[in-house]
Amino acid sequence: MFLLCATREDIFGVAAPTIRMIRDNRHRIDEAFRADRANKSMFLDIIRAPNKMTRQLRRMHRYGVLSKYLPEFGRIVGQMQHDLFHTYTVDAHTLEVVKNCRRFEYPDFEERFPVSSRVARRLPKVELLYIAALYHDIGKGRGGDHSELGAVDAENFCREHGLSERDTEMVTWLVRNHLTMSAVSQRKDISDPEVIQQFAEHVGDQDHLDYLFTLTVADINGTNPTLWNAWRGSLLRQLYTETGRALRRGLDNPVDKQAWVDKTRDAAIDILEGRGFTPGELEELWQERGEEYFLRERAEDIAWHTEAVASHHDREKPLVLVRNFSDSSVANTTQIFIHARSRAQLFSVICAELEQLDLSVHDARVYNANDGMSLDTFFVLNSDGQPIADDALRLKNIRDRLSESLASDTSYPDIVKRRTPRQMKSFSIPTETRMSVDEINNTSVLEVASPDRPGLLARLGRIFVDFNIELQAAKIQTLGERVEDVFFITDDQQQPITDPERCEAIQRAIREELDQQAVA
């Protein structure tokens, strides 16, 4: 019946007597039924159906057929997800992800998902994406790594339903790695060619990249309608694009980091020569800049920074630049560039003022030059995750407020004045921290997961000061009412923090500060 509904255009629904008949005979779906080749073939035909496939899966779920045919799916029916950003039970989320995968093929959704739609249409076998979506969270609630547990179930399904070895490998790999692309894009420095090279080696080929990209976009959009925004989309697109280039270049032919730096410098010089600068002047202006600046910043932004710094003659007075940027690489965020004398609480002051301005930081890059100056770039959105309107007065207010705060000697306690909202105090989930060493960039990686609250970044900045920590970069993400922030840090000698006792002391101070604030 479900296959007929999926393949016949003249069938528009299921009558009540038929529904009662289905429910009264669900007990017939037993081991023998599931082992029948005809039934297996019929289920795959539903997955491959050109029309109304997700509608039939939802019907099968509603009538209790899906959980009977796939007992592993039955174990996630009605299962709650105990976090602050999932809005669906596991089974409802799963079917929503399948639906999102299907939407990529519909012209009506091309404007919302332009890249995913193009990629999905060229997948060799789109049904593999649907099967991976159906199984990606099926291991939840059993303890252990749900990705690994789900991969086992997915492999069993594929083998029992006669999929080829190659197709089985693809589905199993997707389930096992369905969180990987999101984690890399939001927790690693994807402007670093070595990070891209490592991810490209993990993916292996363009087909795996295409399937994983579409599954990742569908998964995020099926978690919580508020989680997907232009910023997350831009991070995934950047990672997808750069990884594709690495694969086309060949995994045995990685990008030379110095060549990347030289290319960016040359591109910035070309822009600035058209604005009256000579190469000699630029070399003098850039002599205190490290290679990380040219590795991670775009030539257009370097030119923007350089021209403003060259025209700003009073180094004791902070320079603040603010602009909206519609380029897809920065996803309609507002860019804030700050050139100021480096001091202990600079990061805290900036973050506290942005908080007062009702702005959320989504990316931060900090460069401490050898001449005692700090070059900081922040990408911000409104606190609700939406772009800031292209309002000249609003942008001027942001610039003026930051300039005033940075120019004053106001102490930290007088900056953060907002209190934790009453509704946030009901979330008693303790702060989690983790530290590791990034061998590629020679930094320590500090991960902080905590319920969101006003002043969180500024408070973390104060702890960095207390422990003589130098912040090199930050990845800031808010998942509903929960933040999962990643900080790339070093000691005051620009070396990773490796002493176990010091690492534990830093993490303990963070947990105590944030958890104490939560109940204040």
Image (cartoon, rainbow, N blue to C red):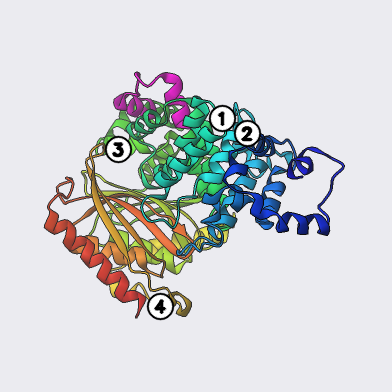
Indicate which label's residue lies in the foreground, 4 or 1: 1
Q: What's the magenta bit mostly, secondary-structure-wise?
A: helix
Dot placed on the residue nearer the N-terminal end, 1 or 3 = 1
Tell me what residue is drawn at x 61 percent, y 34 percent: 127
Q: Work out whether residue 69 can be spotted.
A: yes
Residue under pointer 1: 162
Does any portion of residue 324 appear in the rendered image? no
Q: Position of residue 367 (x, y in %)?
A: 29, 46
Residue 426: x percent and y percent? 43, 77
Amino acid type, callout 2: Arg
Label 4 vs 1, first from the N-terminus: 1
Label 3 sits on what residue type? Glu
Question: Quarter holding the C terminus?
Answer: bottom left
Label 3: which secondary element: helix
- Camera-side residue: 137 or 410? 137
Magenta stretch in the rendered image: 241-265
Q: Which mark is residue 37?
A: 2
Q: How far is the residue under mark 3 from the one under mark 2?
A: 58 Å
Q: Secondary structure at mark 1?
A: loop
Circle 3 Cα neighbour tier, 10 Å, few/some/many (<14 / 14–19 / ≥20): some
Nearest to viewer (mark 3 / mark 4): 4
Nearest the camera: 288 or 166? 166
The residue at 34%/32% (across/down) is: 198
In-image side of 332 versus 252 (left or right): right
From the image, state whether disc 2 or disc 4 is nearer to you. Answer: 2
